[in-house]
């Protein structure tokens, strides 16, 4: 079966760095997305990785290792507004998105 | 980025009525749109994949006669919840992508609408 694993909840301090991990087992791989979802709102796009390595975009970076079936989202200089759920999603061989359950990130002052 | 709109954003209706939700891609043509449902504190659940000009593909467990999907144009897909009941109360979110399958090196992204919150009394 297809499976995406991410931690259910994480807590971090304002100004710190946090890494949210995602491991996947899917039928084929055509890319991995990270989305941010604030409570009561629709997800918004953060990043897309299809090749191994680190993609940096401002305070957010995303890493992919296809051989390990592993990705992480790195958030630097955390702000209170970063409190949200972070969703990992993998594009499988049929170009369908397989969603993780999301990681709820709680930022404390 | 591309913009996807949904209308209405909020619906409150009586049990037994039908509710139509519209999803529009505003600045690109979406050959494929997706409909999701999300219950409180739960993950997104894909309900169906809607391809322009053809029948929608429903996920297992989703009743196609209850959740009618029409994708009549490249910029509009509609979801109609027929004979809604309180258990249908949920957050319905559509998303759209503009290319199937993606070209090599092309970053294909699903763009989400803002969602429609449905409350059935």
Image: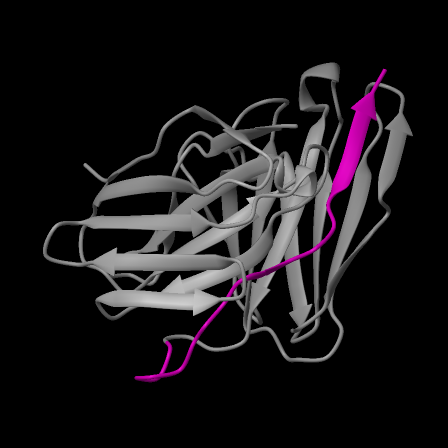
* In-front residue for pair A61/B31: A61
Residue A107's place in the image compared with B9, above or below, is: above
Figure quadrant of residue B33? bottom right
Residues rendered magenta in the picture: B102-121
Residue B114 is inside the magenta segment: yes
Colour theme: one colour
The residue sitting at 29% across, 68% down in the picture is: A50
Does the magenta stretch mainly form a helix, a strand or a loop?
Answer: loop
Q: Quadrant of the C terminus of chain B?
A: top right
Q: Quadrant of the N terminus of chain B?
A: bottom right
Image location of residue B112, percent across then percent down: 63, 56
Figure quadrant of residue B20? top right
Residue B65 visible:
no
Q: Residue furthest left?
A: A67
The residue sitting at 46% across, 34% down in the picture is: A102
Question: Horizontal placement of A18 versus B74: left or right?
Answer: left
* In-front residue for pair A98/A4: A4
* In-front residue for pair A29/B64: A29
């Amino acid at each position: 079966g297809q499976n995406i694993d991410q931690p259910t909840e994480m807590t971090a301090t304002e100004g710190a760095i946090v890494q949210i991990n995602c491991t996947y087992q899917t039928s084929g791989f055509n890319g991995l997305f990270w989305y941010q979802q604030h409570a009561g709102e629709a997800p918004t796009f953060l990043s897309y990785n299809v090749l191994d390595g680190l993609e940096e975009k401002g305070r957010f970076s995303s890493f992919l290792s296809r051989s390990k079936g592993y990705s992480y989202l790195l958030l630097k200089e955390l702000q209170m507004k970063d409190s949200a759920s972070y969703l990992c999603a993998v594009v499988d061989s049929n170009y369908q998105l397989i969603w993780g359950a999301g990681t709820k990130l709680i930022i404390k002052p | 980025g591309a913009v996807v709109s949904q209308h209405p954003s909020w619906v409150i209706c009586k049990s037994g009525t039908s509710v139509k939700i519209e999803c529009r891609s505003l600045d690109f043509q979406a050959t494929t749109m997706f409909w999701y449902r999300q219950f409180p504190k739960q993950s997104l659940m894909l309900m169906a994949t809607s391809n322009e000009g053809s029948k929608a593909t429903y996920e297992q467990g989703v009743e196609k006669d209850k959740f009618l999907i029409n994708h009549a144009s490249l910029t509009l897909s509609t979801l109609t919840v027929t004979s809604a009941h309180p258990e249908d109360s949920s957050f319905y979110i559509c998303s759209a992508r503009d290319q199937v399958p993606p070209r090599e090196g092309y970053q294909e992204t699903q763009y989400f609408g803002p969602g429609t919150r449905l409350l059935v009394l």
